[in-house]
């Protein structure tokens, strides 16, 4: 089966978050199941640098200028790239300009991605006519709409929701510029509360809908977490599936990770101590042998609940803990963590910005990884933590609830606990979780049990790739 994956990010070429990890790793796991995946991505400068593709099509006019469709391979990925300098030749983030604001033409930029993907779905490229077009998030949301309105061949379509908070909503007067017919502007089309909704359109038109964990698939059908789309999702629940993300076990392997000072395995856990020392040194933390070291690797945003952690830092320090935080995003949160680090020298260490190597060192050196998200579609950092023997301490929401087994009495008694969960998400429950974590830390046999259980957990892609294959088959069946 041939599948076209459509996304704005793909690891290791362009990444701002978990979306890239998934679109980078899933094609390899699907290849093992006999699915031939090619991924189409915008021709951002970093992508073009990695690949000198061969031109397979020329567009005289693609949303404001000429463009070429390139095909080629980079870093083991089979890619289509839209080389459209007027849309994508911009350094930095794929979404925001140097002023920190969204690029003003984001609607056109990602409509172009969806438009070209739909054309490939119809058979534009000889030798690669996909049975299924798999769109990821709002940036690819118009693919099924273009296939619906454009006529011609109609492959099966899937939208995967990586985060319902990002919906791609744009002014109604762009309808024509986005090459959508006037008839599309209705509730049974792309209209969304008087505007154009890219993700809404995808949820309406796709044959199949997936999101990235079973619990998130249920949560988003409820008015509290559905972010305006819960009603539509309820009407489509028969084709809505929660399929857990995995992590790329070659990229995230503590036994061979080049970013670690000491590589280790479940049998050689003692070696983690070298990474812990190195991490402490890098973040200016004291070499206190008694202190459990908590790690955070995260976007700094309201979703991630890190404002709650700011409030809980006094408890963390009082309990004798230390914190190593790597994050980027919200300036107020950066300022709050920076002040906390100044107020607690040697106990709280912070780094702001994006740093792949440090992210790996935190996973391989911290004792516990904190993930206090208010909502979390799947979450990848807790999966990395499980694999790296950093005990995840997570909010009981979304994919965090599905992937970490809380160290409650029953789970401890039956020897299956792999981390700690807390609920509901608040500063108080986070503080209690920190206190509970420290208590378990001081009972080292129990702690090691959690680490080993975590390291045994299946966090790879194989099982989920098979579930995607089933969904692809359903999408194809619904078209025949
Ligand atoms: P989200 O996609 O919501 O940001 P996920 O947990 O699904 O959250 O994925 C986050 C991914 O981004 C993980 O691979 C994590 O290691 C990485 N990451 C997050 N923040 C940083 C950072 N500041 N530096 C390096 N990697 C980061």
Image: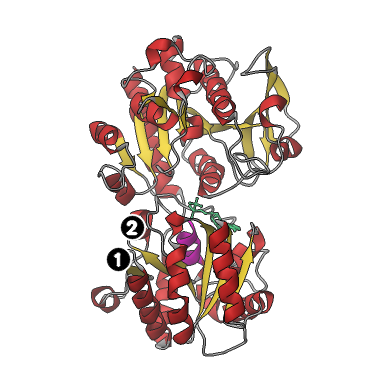
Vertical side of 324 occupied by 471: above or below: above
Q: Nearer the viewer, residue 56 or 174?
A: 174
For this view, does 58 lie left or right of residue 399? right
**In the image, what residue occupies the spot 46% across and 37% down?**
137
**In the image, what residue occupies the spot 35% across and 80% down?**
436
**Label 2 secondary element:** loop
Distance (Cα) linking label 1 and label 2: 8 Å
For this view, does 368 lie left or right of residue 47? left
Residue 105 percent across, percent down from the top left: 60, 28
**In the image, what residue occupies the spot 38% across and 81% down?**
435
**Label 1 secondary element:** loop
**In the image, what residue occupies the spot 34% across and 77% down?**
432
Magenta region: 380-387
Residue highlighted by disc 2: 397
Who comes first in sequence, dot 1 or dot 2?
A: 2
Q: Would the CB of label 2 be found within 8 Å of ligand 1?
A: no
Which mark, residue 423?
1
Q: Quick check: which quadrant has ligand 1? A: bottom right
* Any part of residue 26 in sight: yes
Residue 216 percent across, percent down from the top left: 33, 48
Q: Nearer the viewer, residue 86 or 149?
A: 86
Residue 188 percent across, percent down from the top left: 31, 20
Q: Quadrant of residue 230?
A: top left
């Amino acid at each position: 089966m041939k599948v076209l994956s459509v996304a704005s990010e793909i690891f290791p070429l362009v990444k701002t978050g978990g979306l890239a990890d998934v679109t980078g790793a899933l094609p390899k796991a699907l290849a093992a199941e006999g699915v031939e995946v090619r991924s189409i991505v915008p021709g951002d400068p970093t992508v073009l640098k990695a690949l000198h593709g061969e031109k397979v099509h020329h567009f005289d006019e693609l949303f404001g200028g000429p463009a070429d469709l390139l095909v080629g391979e980079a870093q083991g990925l089979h890619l289509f790239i839209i080389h459209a300098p007027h849309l994508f030749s911009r350094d930095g983030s794929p979404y925001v300009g140097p002023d920190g604001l969204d690029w003003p033409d984001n609607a056109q930029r990602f409509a172009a991605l969806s438009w070209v993907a739909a054309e490939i779905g119809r058979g534009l490229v000889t030798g690669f006519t996909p049975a299924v077009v798999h769109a990821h998030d709002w940036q690819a949301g118009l693919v099924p709409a273009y296939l619906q309105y454009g006529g011609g061949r109609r492959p099966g379509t899937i939208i995967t929701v990586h985060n319902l908070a990002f919906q791609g909503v744009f002014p109604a007067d762009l309808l024509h510029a986005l090459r959508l017919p006037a008839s599309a502007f209705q509730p049974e089309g792309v209209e969304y509360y008087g505007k154009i909704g890219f993700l809404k359109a995808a949820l309406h038109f796709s044959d199949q809908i997936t999101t990235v964990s079973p619990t998130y698939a249920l949560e988003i059908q409820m008015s509290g977490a559905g972010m305006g789309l819960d009603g539509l999702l309820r009407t489509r629940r028969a084709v809505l599936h929660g399929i857990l993300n995995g992590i790329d076990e070659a990229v995230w392997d503590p036994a061979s990770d080049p970013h670690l000072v000491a590589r280790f395995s479940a049998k050689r856990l003692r070696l983690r101590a070298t990474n812990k020392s190195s991490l402490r040194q890098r973040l200016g933390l004291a070499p206190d042998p008694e202190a459990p070291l908590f790690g955070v690797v995260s976007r700094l945003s309201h979703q991630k609940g890190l404002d709650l952690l700011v409030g809980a830092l006094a408890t963390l320090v009082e309990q004798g803990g230390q914190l190593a935080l790597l994050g980027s995003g919200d300036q107020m949160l950066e300022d709050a963590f920076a002040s906390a680090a100044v107020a607690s020298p040697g106990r709280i260490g912070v780094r702001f910005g994006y740093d792949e190597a440090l992210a790996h060192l935190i996973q391989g050196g911290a004792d516990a990884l904190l993930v206090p998200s208010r909502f979390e579609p799947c979450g990848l950092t807790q999966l990395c933590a499980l694999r790296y023997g950093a005990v995840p301490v997570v909010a009981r929401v979304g994919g965090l609830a599905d992937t970490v087994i809380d160290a409650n009495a029953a789970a401890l008694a039956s020897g299956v606990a792999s981390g700690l969960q807390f609920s509901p998400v608040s500063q108080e429950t986070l503080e209690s979780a920190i206190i509970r974590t420290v208590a378990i830390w001081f009972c080292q046999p129990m702690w090691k049990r959690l680490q080993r259980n975590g390291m045994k957990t299946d966090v790879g892609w194989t099982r989920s790739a098979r579930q995607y294959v089933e969904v692809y088959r359903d999408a194809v069946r619904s078209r025949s």
